[in-house]
Image (tube, rainbow, N blue to C red):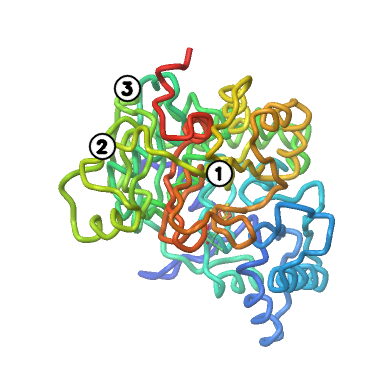
């Protein structure tokens, strides 16, 4: 039988198959953060089981970290306790931790790829749903629950059913001003938030082939928002060029040998998928969401669907929108460019290119939060900070920040925030906050105009 990219990686990691049951899957890399690791460490302690392979585990602090004064002790007591616990657990178990203040610190799905920890062909897990991000490198990467975190600690393996296979093809040429974020918001708006349930999704077609690694990460990041366990893209020269030379990437001959193997990680012609969808790049426009799940998306210049279910009505009432309403020209007081979806250097370059020489509207609070210390350093190196500062944007230190408001970066109740993150659930960015998901370009243009605006008209 012809194999898909997913089959190839999966099959090469199966330690044992239980007849008519799950597989025991070997895990190459286990990433951990402060939120979902404490109970798993406790479980190890309670059961007196040692951590099996600490060198395959990497830790960072990201969710509870403040984005100001990171050199000072963390003010919030609960956050401080959580970060301390992570530090202690890592020390006791010999795990490398890139904690707050470390030059490699950052959101787990931003720092691991940029350090070369994420490599094609790997299996990667983390107690975090957006682990799907790493699939951009041609890996099987997915989020796991806390008891599974303990399982991986103890055995470097996971007992898991092989998911079904889904392929989403997008071919053609994207219009000017349409970004990877628009592509994935478009796909989810067409397929819905349950379309991926039970599947692992391969993204194929020239749109993804022509995308940068940053763009591919944005797309794979949101696979979970259509319900898929994860998403992945076949590795190619773009992938290899990105990985080469990264701190923990293999070097020299080892890299060349691996590269030859990575080149074989492609879906074979004629391999079968359980489900397949195809879209035309030309149909995709800049996208925004209008509701309280990432599938409730429309084109920026479009209008909110008139026909809807009860939950649509509830979502619209939460958002303060009407069926049939167009959101162009809607005044917006907050924008957030950050999160593991869109906080990589390319995202800030795109935003800065648009913002340069302009100033944010007076009504807008514009928050820029890099995904990692390395991205933050690069922003300085490239002088993007000056562009942001001159335009009146606030540039902070790295972390998850207003993506889920586990720190002080909250959007006030009732306020709209055009946000580059991945979830627009009720209260996600602070109690009563109203999130409109969009690309960094849409967020930047909104900040300048003080309202949602069709920036494609002024792009050259
Ligand atoms: C805190 C963590 C468990 C959670 C996740 O798994 O996704 C968070 O990262 C999120 O984005 O909601
Ligand atoms: S940035 Fe947001 S989505 Fe990503 S890991 Fe952090 S909280 Fe989750």
Quadrant containing ligand 2 reads: bottom right
Q: Relative to residue 179, is residue 189 depicted above or below?
A: below
* Mark 3, other Cα within 10 Å: few <14 / some 14–19 / many ≥20: few
Q: Nearer the viewer, mark 2 or mark 3?
A: 2
* Mark 2, other Cα within 10 Å: few <14 / some 14–19 / many ≥20: some
Q: CA distance from mark 3 to mark 1?
A: 28 Å
In contact (CB < 8 Å): disc 2 and disc 1: no
Q: Secondary structure at mark 1?
A: strand
Q: Position of residue 355 (x, y in %)?
A: 59, 25
Q: Secondary structure at mark 3?
A: helix
User: Residue at 30% across / 51% down in the picture?
Assistant: 195
Q: Counting residues from the N terminus, which is met first, the one under dot 2 or under dot 1?
A: 2
Q: Which residue is mark 2?
A: 303
Q: Position of residue 259 (x, y in %)?
A: 64, 33
Q: Which residue is mark 1?
A: 336
Report the front residue among 82 and 59: 82
């Amino acid at each position: 039988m012809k194999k898909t990219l997913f089959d190839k990686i999966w099959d090469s990691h199966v330690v044992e198959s239980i007849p008519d049951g799950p597989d025991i899957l070997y895990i190459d890399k286990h990433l951990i953060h402060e939120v979902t690791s404490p109970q798993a460490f406790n479980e190890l302690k309670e059961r007196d089981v040692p951590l099996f392979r600490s060198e395959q585990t990497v830790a960072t602090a990201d969710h509870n970290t403040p984005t100001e004064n990171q050199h000072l002790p963390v003010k919030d007591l609960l956050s401080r306790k959580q970060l301390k616990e992570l530090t202690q657990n890592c020390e006791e178990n010999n795990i490398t931790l890139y904690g707050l203040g470390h030059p490699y610190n950052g959101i787990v799905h931003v720092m691991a790829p940029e350090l070369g920890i994420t490599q094609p062909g790997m299996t990667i897990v983390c107690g975090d749903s957006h682990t799907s991000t790493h699939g951009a490198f041609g890996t099987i990467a997915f989020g796991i629950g806390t008891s599974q975190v303990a399982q991986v600690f103890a055995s470097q393996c996971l007992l898991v059913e092989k998911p079904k296979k889904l392929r989403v093809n997008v071919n053609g040429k994207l219009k000017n001003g349409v970004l990877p974020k628009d592509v994935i918001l478009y796909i989810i708006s067409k397929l819905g938030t349950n379309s991926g349930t039970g599947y692992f999704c391969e993204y194929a077609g020239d749109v993804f082939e022509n995308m940068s690694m940053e763009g591919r990460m944005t797309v794979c990041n949101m696979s979970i928002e259509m319900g898929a366990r994860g998403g992945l893209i076949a590795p190619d020269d773009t992938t290899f060029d990105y990985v080469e030379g990264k701190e923990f990437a293999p070097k020299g001959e080892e890299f060349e040998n691996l590269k030859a193997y990575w080149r074989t990680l492609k879906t074979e012609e004629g391999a079968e998928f359980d489900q397949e969808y195809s879209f035309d790049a030309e149909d995709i426009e800049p996208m925004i969401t209008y509701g309280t799940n990432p599938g409730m998306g429309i084109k920026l210049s479009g209008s909110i669907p008139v026909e809807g279910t009860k939950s649509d009505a509830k979502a619209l009432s939460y958002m303060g929108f009407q069926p049939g309403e167009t959101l162009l020209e809607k005044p917006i007081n907050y924008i957030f460019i950050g999160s593991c979806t869109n906080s990589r250097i390319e995202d800030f370059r795109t935003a800065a290119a648009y913002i340069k020489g302009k100033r944010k509207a007076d009504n807008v609070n514009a928050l820029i939060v890099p995904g990692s210390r390395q991205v933050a350093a690069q922003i300085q190196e490239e002088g993007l900070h000056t562009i942001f500062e001159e335009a009146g944007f606030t540039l902070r230190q790295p972390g998850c920040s207003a993506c889920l408001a586990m720190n002080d970066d909250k959007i006030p109740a009732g306020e709209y925030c055009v946000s580059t993150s991945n979830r627009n659930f009720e209260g996600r960015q602070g109690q009563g906050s109203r999130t409109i998901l969009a690309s960094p370009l849409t967020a930047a243009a909104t900040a300048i105009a003080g309202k949602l605006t069709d920036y494609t008209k002024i792009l050259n």
